Structure formats: structure tokens, C-alpha cells
Image (cartoon, rainbow, N blue to C red):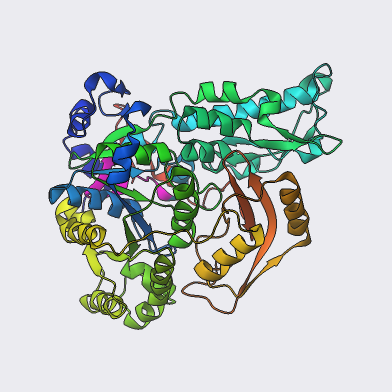
Amino acid sequence: MSFPTDIEIAESSKIQHIKNIAEKIGIAEDDLEYYGKYKAKIPLFYIDEEKVKKSKLVLVTAINPTPAGEGKTTVSVGLNDGLNKIGKKSVAVLREPSLGPVFGVKGGAAGGGYAQVIPMVDINLHFTGDFSAIEKANNLLSALIDNNLQNKKFSLNIDPRTITWKRVMDMNDRALRHIIVGLGGSMNGIPREEGFNITPASEVMAILCLSNDFEDLKNRLGNIFVGFTFDKKPIFARDLKAESAMAILLKDAIKPNLVQTLEGNPAILHGGPFANIAQGTNSIIATKTGLSLADYVVTEAGFGADLGAEKFLDIKCHYGNIKPDAYVIVATVRALRYHGGAKKGEYEVPNLPSLRKGFENLGKHIENAAKFGMHPIVAINRFATDSEEEIDFIKEECSKINVKAILAEEFTKGGTGMMELAEEVVRSVESGKNNFKPLYKVDDSVEHKIETIAKEIYGAESVVYSQKAKNQLKTIYELGFDKVPICMAKTPKSLSDDDTKIGRPTDFKITIREFEFAAGAGFIIPILGDMMRMPGLPNVPAAEGMFIDKDGKITGLS
């Protein structure tokens, strides 16, 4: 008998009314803002800063992602269920999926097997409309920019050639990366080069996720850099009087969303920024809401630890004044085989030599955790094709460096398969071994911050700057944008900036091709390699395998 699909498991589960889930964490029914029976928004007044300081935050990250899969979200959901099973009051706080990856590669992003957040279909599709609101706020600013270019009476004298702001949509559509707008005569605007990013890459998404409250959100929106005037004066969204109107569109989107796991435990989903260019973690507001309502919060950071976790620790912790109390690195035997040189078709075949080589990638991420003052736990996300010999090897190698590696069997067993990991997380929290410290000081020079990340986290020998990057760096200093964290944009597939260098590459340099700066979100973005803010669809998009019948039943989401 074959194992059921994710959507089959989700739809066969007994889902509770969301008011019952809210009751478990002390949210009054009258305070819920319902989106149907199974999802609701939580008012911001539930954030209690004193409770935030007392509750425990568990960060789940992973090795560098591979085609073989790692499963951070699945482990995060399962760990939350496991913590509740051992008697801890725990909430999972996760990101919302983007329609682009759902219909492109992933087919779904709400966990998997018996470790999912539900209602699975709603979460994977339009959910509560947060992404749509972010898209509209982003594109309102675009419309105001083009309107000002057209406006002779109230023109800000913006040089169209310097405008960095782009429109967004939540779908992978490569044809929109580079376009010309304003064609068709004088009534249709000023012709200029433009383009679309995908919504998770929008600075508005990053702002929503890094804001501490609504007033902070509005101020950050006003600080968005637009471009320069013809006489080289910087123009911000506030100069276009855009921030309040943008905030109006986000008045509901700023509130976190309450859903549940398959086992009826609370989960909060909010925001969905890409980890390589928009910092890759859910919102500060959602995290603090979870910490205010529970004793434990399990959260994740996108891509591998070199991207998502580093940004969580150096950006989100900085702006949210929070810190992790435990640190979990997810690895799979399959993915370690890949990092050791296994090719497509070989990921499912036991291969100790490949695993031994691939372990170097995990080893580097373990080393990196210590640089933040964290003592990590390794979660071996189990697959049926894992051999006992390979699992024992990972455990033994971790033990040699005083790190505990524990089987995570959430996919097939739910919370029951995560109780051992949950117990170890509690021990780690209570041990006093984790004493978080950021990797760098935000007041350090931009070059020093970049070099620190490159050498300490990636293992690079040095950093090289293109002439374009050098010129842009000068502008960053002139505008006073330098005293902020760094949001490194590089391939997630490698510790280096070359996605072909798997495992643990050595003897490499990283090259800063250019800079972007998110003045509203509050970070600088060095661009390494050929980064895309608008992905394309694969040869066979996940959308092709989806189907809806005459009764509205959906299949093909995973």
C-alpha cells in the first residue's frame, strides 16, 4: 500500500474550528478576525514584551538545499507537535507560501506527510490575502512614481534613469523581468525601462516582516528609496506622500494569521520573504505574538543556514530585539549524498563514501552556529531509503564534535516521531549553553560586515568588488545608508557564490557584482552572481500536475 499524498492526508484529517485553537493559547473568541472557519487574524495587542523575554525561541535551519530535499518546514511543524506532546505549550511560527514556487517547483509549502499546517489548500493558495495586499501597496508606489513623472505642476524632477523601484506580482513570470512602460503617446506616461519582481522579493514584504508595529511599518514605507532627481537629490516614498496610503493597504496584512497543525496545535503564519534578497524569515510581529502566547516558539529561516539563519540572527534579531534559545540544523541522508557527489537517480541509493564527503557541508554549518554562540542540534529528517549505517555515521561524526544528532520521523509519525528531538531541544534550552551574539556590529564598515560574513560563514578567502559595486558603495556612504545590517544575495545551493561548488568548497573568492539598498527595510543587499528577483517556471511546472473537479476538489498540491 502506497503512502498517501500530502493533500490526501490533509483532507482526511479532522480540522478544528479556529476558535478552539485560539482558546488553547488564550485568545478570546471576540478578538479573532475570521477568514472562514479555519483561519483567523490575531490583533496586535496580544504582543506582550515582558512575556516575549521569558518565552523560548527555537530556530530551525538546514544545510544548503539540494534537489534531494531537506524539509525545514516539515521538521518545524513536527517539532512543534513533539513539544506539545511532551507537555510544553508551543506554537509554530512560519512563513506563508508564495504562489510562484507552489505552481513552479514545490507544488506546495505547508509541511508534508503527518507534519503539516492546515487548511493546506487555503494556505498554499490565496490564504488571507496578505501577499495581494503587499503587491498592491508595492504597485501603488510604482503608480505614484509614474504619475509624478507625468505631472508637470507637482513634479519632483525625478530622473527616470535612476528609478530602482519595480512592480511585483506573486507568480514566476520571466517575461516580465525587463519591460518598457509608458508607450503609446503622451497620455500613457513617460517611456522608461521597468520590470517586475516576484512579491516575496519586494521590499514591502521585507518591511512588513521587520516592522515592530503599525507606526514602525508606516515610517519604514516612507523611507523606501526611489531614485534621484536630475540634480542628484535622493527621492524617497515619503517625498511622494506614499507611506500612509501604502500602510492603509497593509492594515490587515500586518496582523499575523492563526491556523493549526494536523494534530490540532496552534501555528502562526505571516509573511513570506525570499531568503537571498529579502531576509527570509517570518515577521517580527508574528514571532513576538507566538512568544506572547506560548512558552516555546518554533520558527524557521529560509534556504540553508548560510542565508536564512545568518539573516535571522544578524537582521531580524537586531530589529526585533529577540534571540534564539535553541538552534536546530536539518539534514537528510539523501541531501548529504548529493553534497558528496551523488548524481540524480543516486540520491535514494545507500552510499557511505558520498555521505562521508557530503557531511563536510553539515560540519561547516555546525561550526558556523558556534560563531553565534549557539550549540546546535542536528535533526536527521528520515527517508525510507536511509541505511542504518549512514544514520549511525552521522550520529557518530556529530558526537565527535559534541553535537547531538537525532532522527526526525515527523513525516510518517507526526509529533510522536519528534518527541526525542523535542526533549533534546528542551535540554538545550535549559542547559545554558546557548548564548547568542551577532556576527558583527551594525556600525562596522560595509566592507568589514561583508568580509566577516564571507570569511566566517561561507569560508571564502577574500571579497572582490566590481567597479559598478565600488561606485554604488560610494553612494551608500554618501547617503548615510551604511550603518545597517547586510542582506547577502547569493545562490542558496552552495556556501560559495557558485552553485556548482557543492559540499564544503575551499580556496574561493566571492564577487560583489553590484549593490542594492533597502532603506525602508533597513539593510544593504550585496548581489553575488546572477541573482533573479523574478524566477522562471521549470520545464515541467508543478501547475501541470494540478487538477480541480466539478465539485471543487483539488488534487496535485503537495
Residue visible at 19% across and 55% down in the picture: 412
State the image coordinates of residue 233 (x, y, percent, origin top left).
Answer: 80, 36
Relative to 160, 2 lies left or right: left
State the image coordinates of residue 421 (x, y, percent, origin top left).
Answer: 21, 60
Q: Residue farthest to the right?
A: 231
Based on the displayed image, in which of its 4 quarters is residue 37 positioned?
A: top left
Whether the magenta-drawn stretch holds residue 384 is answered as: no
Q: Residue farthest to the top?
A: 153
Observer-nearest of 57 and 49 = 49
Observer-nearest of 36 and 342 = 36
Based on the displayed image, in which of its 4 quarters is residue 60 positioned?
A: bottom left
Q: Which stretch is magenta?
A: 106-118
Numbered circles on residues, count: 0
Observer-nearest of 312 and 194 = 312
Q: The N terminus is located in which quarter?
A: bottom left
Residue 270 in sight from this viewpoint: no
**Can you say whether 515 is above or below 227 in the image?**
below
